[in-house]
Amino acid sequence: MSNEKFDERFDQAFEEAFDAAASKVDSPYPAPDTKQQSWQKIKQQLDHKKKRRKRKQHYQIAGVIAASVVGGAVIFSPPAMTQAISPIYQQVKDFGDGILQVVSGRDEPKQEDYSRAKTPPPPGYFDDDPEAEMHGYKENSAVAESNSADYDFTLEEVKQQATFVLPEFKYIPEGFEFDDIRVTELKRTDPINWVTTLYLNDKGQSLTFSIHNLADGRKVTVGVLGELSEITLKSGDKGQFMELSNGHNNVDFIHDNLRIIISGPFGKDELLKIANSMEQ
């Protein structure tokens, strides 16, 4: 039985048990109010976990960034590389067969010559920095689980703790409403360097904004499976449009010290319209 089906059946069984127990709190046993409060506390905890699972499923469907494919595919041939302007750069590695890796950071990437190598490099060799912020996505997974799973941050709390000014997007496609915000910090009081916001419509489709602050020298590495083309926004910011195999296409660009990835079930024109509506 899958975890999802198990969770659904467990929730149903628990709620039935809860209703049965709650109906008996007016029995002659002492302290019925205490019993009812205890049951209510447990039910609140269960509801909170169910909400977490629902959010996680939406983030997985969202396709903030497609499955990471760095690894086995890397060993077949050295990647072709392109590079944007400094001091903030975006380096695109094309491994062939629609397998791409996009690296962003402040320091110039190393341009190494692999043409004379007699044997292929080991898996993971092309990861620029072992400490780079690598999204370790599994096959058919779209987004990693947030490290802040135990915290509920409001939008205002994120704005106060973020190390950057959160950009606003004036255009959101019709039917999509703000649903959730996630950060990656291990402690609730840590400065926030990476924010992902989630919008949903009544069909369960998702629109996500993933924003990374590169100002402190960190790198962000993203693996995608699809096709990539260069774009230039009205602001002059340059980036890529990623047409992904999972149907959630991305616009990925650098603005000042921020790497911004917008993902949703839209074509290029609609994603560019969203990106061009950005204000900061």
Image (cartoon, grey):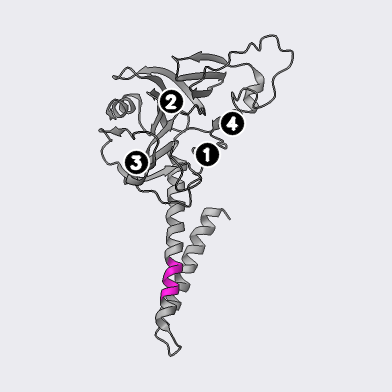
- Quickly name the residue at label 3: 159
**104 or 52: nearer the eye?**
104
User: Of helix, strand and loop, which one carries label 2?
Assistant: strand
Above or below: residue 219 compared with residue 28 = above
The boundaries of the magenta stretch are: 37-43
- Quickly name the residue at label 1: 141
> Which quarter of the image is occupied by the C terminus?
top left
**Are there few (<14), some (14-19), or many (20+) residues within 10 Å of tag 3?**
some
- First-in-chain label (4 vs 2): 4
* Residue 242 visible in image: yes
User: Of helix, strand and loop, which one carries label 4?
Assistant: loop
Q: Are marks 1 and 3 in contact (CB under 8 Å)?
A: no
- Quickly name the residue at label 4: 131
Amino acid on which the number 2 mark rests in the picture: Glu
Amino acid on which the number 4 mark rests in the picture: Glu
Q: Label 4 vs label 2: CA separation?
A: 28 Å
Amino acid on which the number 3 mark rests in the picture: Lys
- Find residue 206 and report its image quarter: top left
